[in-house]
Image (cartoon, rainbow, N blue to C red):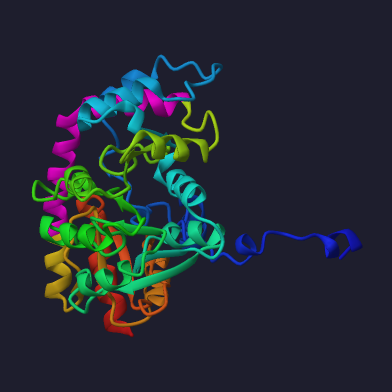
Amino acid sequence: MSDAHARLRLNPHVAALPPYNAGLSLDVARRASGRDDIARLASNENPDGCSPRVLDALRGFDPSRYADPACTALREAIGAFLGAAPDRIVCGNGSEELIAAISRAALEPGRDVLTVAPSFGLHEIEPLAAGARVRKVAMREDFGFDLAALEDALRNGPALFFLSSPWNPVGPALDEAGLRRLAEAAQGLGTLFVLDEAYFEYGGDALPDAQRILGEAGLPFVILRTFSKAYGLAGLRVGYALASDTALARTIAAAKTPFNVNGAAQIAALAALADQDWMRASVAKLEVRRTWLAEGLEAAGFRVAPSRTNFLFVDTGGDSAEAAAALLSEGIIVKPWREAGFERFLRVTIGTASDSERFLTALIRWRDQT
């Protein structure tokens, strides 16, 4: 190592970050398994693809021009869809970028952040990158949110509360009473309440109106959603944040890069948002396959968390990394959960009917051979 490298000082908060498990690519899976027929069930992509309107809209895309850095047309369309002023909406290069921007905007070294466990990795990684301390409240044995423990932790006044509902990676969602309990616990403490609704479209009609509930509680809040899941735009990376007021939205927008949502993504998101019928039909088909797979796993003796998402969280009864390796050898990609205390679990995307059947058969075979 040269003297210059020895003297180099990197940000210790970033240097110490845990890696984010982004899953395997198709090429890596093909090389590892020696198979071409890969069932990609780790990244919660939509097996139906996207609305045909999206593909039609993209035919006119000109990649030589910069996109609108303010995402004006997209924010106006989202605002009309949500019944919210466009200046309260911030668009990002996936909701992941917005999680980073919120952390940068709201945190300083030494401040406290609250989230749940198991957690979506970036709800922990981005606050740690800002030098914050992260406390996690574990799920109950029945796979539910531990509302009492979360209420107690909120009363300590964390700077930021990251909560996903429907819950990635577990699957349940808060009902209205549960969300109100947490909103009331956070009142008057200056906590920024961030509700990550990336899987909102899969949650059904019973999901609470978070904009109304958090607004009535008088909280500073952000609601996150994405076009990656139910709308099938994972490869284009576009998500959005609805902030409780314009000042908060401006600060979040200032914490991200300009031209961050590319032109193709903006065109695609507008077309996808306009085709609610396609999205709802895709969700309805997935719900049937989700029920079939959950019932099949439970009949085979596996514990499965109830899900309001496009995935299942499964207790393998053993080391989930070993299970994932065995599945990969058969050309099936899943995500073993490596968060401390949850190493027996894996998360599996609801794919096509044939991919789900392959997964179920292979997981039973692995369990029976170990």
In the rendered image, residue 6, in percent from the top left (x then y), is placed at 84, 65
Q: Furthest-right residue in view? A: 3
The answer, for residue 182, to whether it is visible in the render is: yes
Q: Furthest-bottom residue in view? A: 370
Q: What is the magenta range?
A: 263-291
Q: Main secondary structure of the magenta part?
A: helix
**Image quadrant in which you'd find residue 61:** top left
Relative to 276, is 333 on the left or the right? right
Quarter holding the C terminus is: bottom left
In the rendered image, residue 363, in percent from the top left (x then y), is placed at 28, 71
The answer, for residue 54, to whether it is visible in the render is: no
Magenta residue check for 286: yes
Magenta residue check for 94: no
In the rendered image, residue 338, in percent from the top left (x then y), is placed at 42, 72
Q: Is residue 323 above or below residue 334?
A: below
- Out of 35 and 157, give the one closest to the viewer: 157
Relative to 360, is 205 on the left or the right? left
Q: How many marks?
A: 0
Q: Is residue 128 above or below residue 301?
A: above
Q: What residue is shown at x 11% (from left), y 66% (from top)? A: 295
Relative to 87, is 201 on the left or the right? left
**Image quadrant in which you'd find residue 300:** bottom left
Q: What residue is shown at x 9% (from left), y 46% (from top)? A: 205
